[in-house]
Amino acid sequence: MAHATATVDMMHPPAPAERGLDVYNNKLGMWVFLASEVMFFTALIGSYIILRFGAPGPWAPPAKVLNVPVTAFNTFLLICSSVTMVKAYAAVADGETHFLRFRPFSGGLKFWMLATIIGGAMFVGVQAYEYTHLVHHGFLPSGAREGSEVAELVASGVVPAATIGLYGSTFYTMTGFHGFHVTCGVISMTYLYVTKALRGKYSRHDYRGVEVIGLYWHFVDLVWIILFTIVYLI
Amino acid sequence: MTGSRGLRSWLTTTDHKRIGLLYFYTAFAFFLVGGLEALLIRAQLARPNGTVVGAETYNQLFTMHGTTMVFLALMPLSAAFFNYIVPLQIGARDVAFPRLNAFSYWVFLLGGLFLNASWIAGPVFRAGVLNVAPDAGWFGYANLTERQYSPGPNVDFWMLGLQILGVSSLAAGFNFIVTILNLRAPGMKMMRLPTFTWMTLVTQFLVITAFPVITVALVFLMFDRFFGAHFYVPQAGATPLLWQHLFWLFGHPEVYILILPAMGIVSEVLPTFSRKPLFGYTVVVYSGVLIGFMGWGVWSHHMFSVGLGPIADSVFSATTMLIAVPTGVKIFNWIATLWGGTIRGTTALHFAVGFIAMFIIGGLSGVTHASPPADLQQTDTYYVVAHIHYVLFGGTIFGLFAGIYYWWPKMTGRLLSEALGKLHFWLTFIGMNLAFFPMHLIGLLGMPRRIYTYAPDLGVSSLNLVSTIGALLIGVATLVFVVNLWRTRSHGAPAPNDPWGGATLEWAIPSPPPPYNFSVIPTVASRLPRWKTEHHDPMPDPPAAPPAPVHVPGGSWWPPVAALGLPVLALALLTHHLWLAFLGVAIMLYGIYRWAFEPFEI
């Protein structure tokens, strides 16, 4: 790849070789922040495991309460947005900062970053739709709303009554915090897109913002794959 | 953007030295508040059947004393030194993210004020009393903290206040890790870092990994209390031990967050005043790192009495006894540093040696709790209170005072009075042993903690009176210290660059340092750059005036503005006003937005 030799100048701290870790401050800061985020989600998921396996009865079968196919599609959407994030990073590292070029056909930084923003925004949108739907059917953070469809499922024994309250609490807390993270990512990336990418501030000599937001984006994506597996599938 | 004087320059400052001083004064004020709460507790317990305060106020006093001292006094007093001293010790012009640093301070101040506002917020909630301060103990066990058992706003203040303070600690943690790893002067390899900077680095790694855990625990509690979730409700199938595990999973690393900075300070003070390099620098550093790792594997020793079973008890007992090993290694290294040195008995050295002695006592009583059968006798008695005060007062506070006497001349340009300093030390030393040593006996004789009074026939009346007299003595000692600080402003001897003959970089520059710190960034060739060693001559001091103008970034209004959004948001939850929530988010977003668009270069 061309960018391997061209990555110079701004991408390294302007200091003598012995100084620091040879990683610029914002990137190191993001790695440290992600280490903290790992602990945050570990505590969330660990608590979920403790509550679920320490509960007095079985957990509700996810497919009876949640709409798994819709969220599976949403997962696909988020993974695609990670791919477009990588494409954005590779494009700017090669100096391709345009939107679209037709002969030969190629997408540049401005195209792939916009695709990532749209992917993230759609994920949040689908999650908002999912929440509205679930609340409408009576699935609440405190359990089942009286007289609702979910309450009927509980009454008929399809969904265990003993654990429905905990199920609601953990479901909304875990997926809610993840959705909050995606929202923050979309806002930050939109900010970088409008103030930096569209104004031509990124070049193959300096694409720090794209790299740092990319790290965050892949982390949020990875966490979702774990959350989707343990909340929706198991 | 701003001048160097006036209120505005302090509100908008991004200079690590000024932020360090702000941390110091704010945390010291909270230290006095926490001390006052302790004196009220001791006044209540001076005699059996005491009537100074009632049971409810007493609960609030011991909860707020613990919370204040841990989160608003000891941690930020350490942060004052992280801010002021660490960039100087590594030869940097500032921290990696100066505005984030200012944000950390303002969030800390506002979080502390929010928490303490509970003392007078009763009328706002029509509580019928003035004080609605948190009252569930500083580790707030669930499900006592659930709405069903704590219906008032007391626990809300606690849980929201701690979440705000967590934001401050986390932001500072990211900042200092990047600063220490990336902003070292040329030649300052990791194994040439001063010990205090090393211990700061370990502490910050503990902060960024432990605080997310308590944040999750508090978020669960918040959702239970405000949105009807069931995380800690046994009737809904939750296990009541979840809170204890989450809290102590944070809580035990937190113990090392409190003590490691003090250990770092002592490791700087002892070599300077024995005129000898720290004995076994490498071992001291690795012991600190090992303590950081092992601190994650001992949390359940706080929970022996819940009945986790023999296997869990044995494992946590073993790890707890093991963690005493690196701690003991450090103690031997400090003693060996003094051995054969040219000792100068300054106040700073008094506090450092006092730290070693008191911390050994606290450490030994700690090893006795590591044995589950012994612990079952000690849990929830005054014996545990004695232990925590020997390690946190005899340990952390003594270490911090050593740091204050050592670095105050660097921070303000004036030397503290040694005569008043010695008086302060001896009063504190005698006072603390009088106050806390009898608590071992009071506890073993069977007096439980957190009970607002006791009967005369329990046989602990005279020991309690001694303890109260000791607490009063600590109060007098602290007044002597305040007089010393006040007097030094005008009467203190002006401090030269290096009043003590220190080995590290902060002593190479004026006291107090100019805004740019180093006129020329030094190049470091040894672990003790300012001392003559076998292979190296002392480093020449940087020139008095910079050879070329040094750019110093101006201040910024946006960190305090963004910080203001957090307490407004907390207030919205507390008072159930949706418009306040929108206002809080709007303030925060506006602050962050302007912050992001502000031209600001370091």
Image (cartoon, coloured by chain):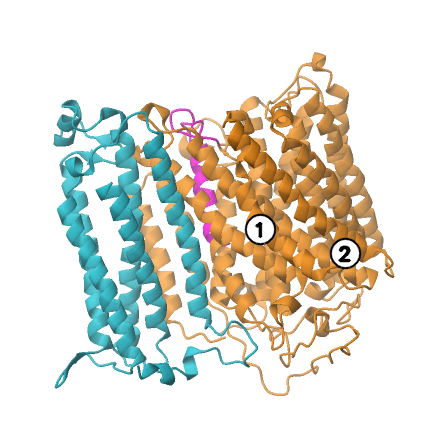
Chain colours: A cyan, B orange
Query: Where is B586 relative to B1, above or below?
Result: above
Q: Is residue B63 left or right of residue B259?
A: left
Label 2: how many residues lie within 10 Å, few (<14), some (14-19) or many (20+)? few
Q: Residue at x 50, y 26 (%)?
A: B309
Of residues B460 and B585, the one nearer the viewer is: B460
User: Residue A181: where, in percent of width, then height?
Assistant: 31, 54
Disc 2 element: helix
Share a chain, discs 1 and 2?
Answer: yes
- The magenta region covers B141-169
Label 2 sits on residue: B487
User: Residue B79: where, in percent of width, then height?
Assistant: 59, 56
User: Residue B381: where, in percent of width, then height?
Assistant: 63, 25
Give the image quarter of residue B417.
bottom right
Of residues B204 and A91, the one nearer the viewer is: A91
Q: Residue at x 29, y 68 (%)?
A: A191
- In the rendered structure, does residue B524 fall within the stretch colored magenta? no
Chain of the residue displaying label 2: B
Q: Residue at x 58, y 49 (%)?
A: B257
Q: Identify which amino acid the numbered label 1 is placed on.
A: Gly
Disc ID at residue A179:
none
Q: Residue furthest top?
A: B457
Q: Is residue B243 visible?
A: yes
Label 1: how many residues lie within 10 Å, few (<14), some (14-19) or many (20+)? many
Label 1 sits on residue: B292
Give the image quarter of residue B185.
bottom right
User: Residue B589: where, in percent of width, then height?
Assistant: 34, 59
Cα gap from disc 1 to disc 2, whole angstroms: 39 Å
